[in-house]
Amino acid sequence: MKIAFLISTLSPGGAEKVAVTLCNQWVKLGHDVTIFTFESPGTPHAYDISTNVKLVQLDLLKESKSKLDFILLNVKRLIKIRAQLRAYNPDISLSFMTEVNIQHMLSTIGLPWPKLISERIHPAYHRLRSIDNFLRQKTYGFADMLAVQSGSIKTWCKNNLRIDAEILPNPIDLAPFKKPVNHVQNEINCKKIVTVGRLNPQKGLDSLIEVFAQLSSTHPDWHLEIYGQGSEKERLERQIQTFNLTSNIKLCGITNDVPAVLWQSDIYVHSARYEGFPNAIIEALAAGCAVVSTDGPTAADELLGKNKFGLLAKNGDLQDLAKQLDKLMTNEQLRLDFKERAAKAVTHLSVEKVANQWLTHMNKLINKKSGK
């Protein structure tokens, strides 16, 4: 199968990681895969791409300076995407994220192969520009299939876009997250809570810091480590200083070894206000972490099995998040029980299984298009 994959960038992020994970698996199975990004040529990518995956960087990220410039730039962008896809002539093309989905649909009008698009975050809570919201309404119906990650997103798409989407969860390469038999917990850094994600309002890290501050007086030996980068860094630093917790809360930046960070944690916490299908929770479970997560508009409740594999806190309820964290911080046996069960929660999300689910849908679309 010849697969064209469109995505804006391959910078650090959940959608980008899923894209690379799937494409690497598909070429491993013998498929011809090309990733088209909007980045300028030579832009480094955050994740390891198989040497068998072709990467085409289209240099389409120039920002417009006026309404006329916006129109001209987008017309040129659509023309270039269309030309590149026609030259590649795939059996199927697919794209991730709303803005790219819209451009994918507009640039492939009349082209013969099936088109697959995917929302990667809960659209009810992710604010779009009015023009993008309008274009999504008008263009998504051109797609042969819309893929989403959870039942709640599927329902939203049915009610708001009049599209019956297919649910395809995020995959994970489980091998790197399996804790080595000889792994030893770092006693110096014990009593550690960890979280990994972008430093932006969606991730609710300001709420997490506030909750940790509430708990710090009764749990002075616990530490919180936040891994990631983003626009909220300075504000979060000021918040930590305000609570006088600079020795207990660290903004650690990007890590190149997420599994090692997770293995050293006593608790993994996910404080997002909304999500699509949180890779961070999947990875924490695969690494054998005791997890606490907000029960926002996301798949956290599905992943944690209604508290079987971790604890859920009511979304937006800081007191409940504090209560659930306190429960794990004070109960070592409960932490050990969750750690023992954690990896079982994500075996069905192995990249081998999920990549094959995507291929099954793509084959159906190709066969339907060709009249088989």
Image: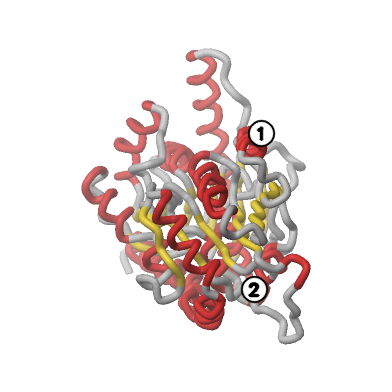
Q: Residue furthest front?
A: 218
Label 2: state its secondary structure.
helix
* 333, 61: nearer the viewer: 333
Q: Residue furthest bottom?
A: 181
The residue under label 1 is 234
> Left or right of 6: which side holds 164?
left
The residue under label 2 is 177
Q: Amino acid at mark 1?
A: Glu
Q: Amino acid at mark 2?
A: Phe
Residue 93's disc number: none
> Left or right of 338: which side holds 143?
left
User: What residue lies at 57% left-to-right and 67% top-to-bottom?
Assistant: 284
For the question of whether residue 147 can be seen, the reply is no
Q: Earlier in the sequence, mark 1 or mark 2?
A: 2
Residue 241 occupies quadrant: top right
> Left or right of 340: which side holds 169?
left
Residue 25 x/y as whole percent:
60, 70
Residue 359 x/y as whole percent:
46, 69
For the question of whether residue 37 can be seen, the reply is yes
Nearest-to-viewer mark from 1 and 2: 1
Label 1: state its secondary structure.
helix
Number of marks in picture:
2
Q: Quick one: label 2, few (<14), some, or many (20+) residues within 10 Å?
A: many
User: What residue lies at 38% left-to-right and 47% top-to-bottom?
Assistant: 316
* 105, 91: nearer the viewer: 105
Residue 285 occupies quadrant: bottom right
Residue 114 x/y as whole percent:
40, 55
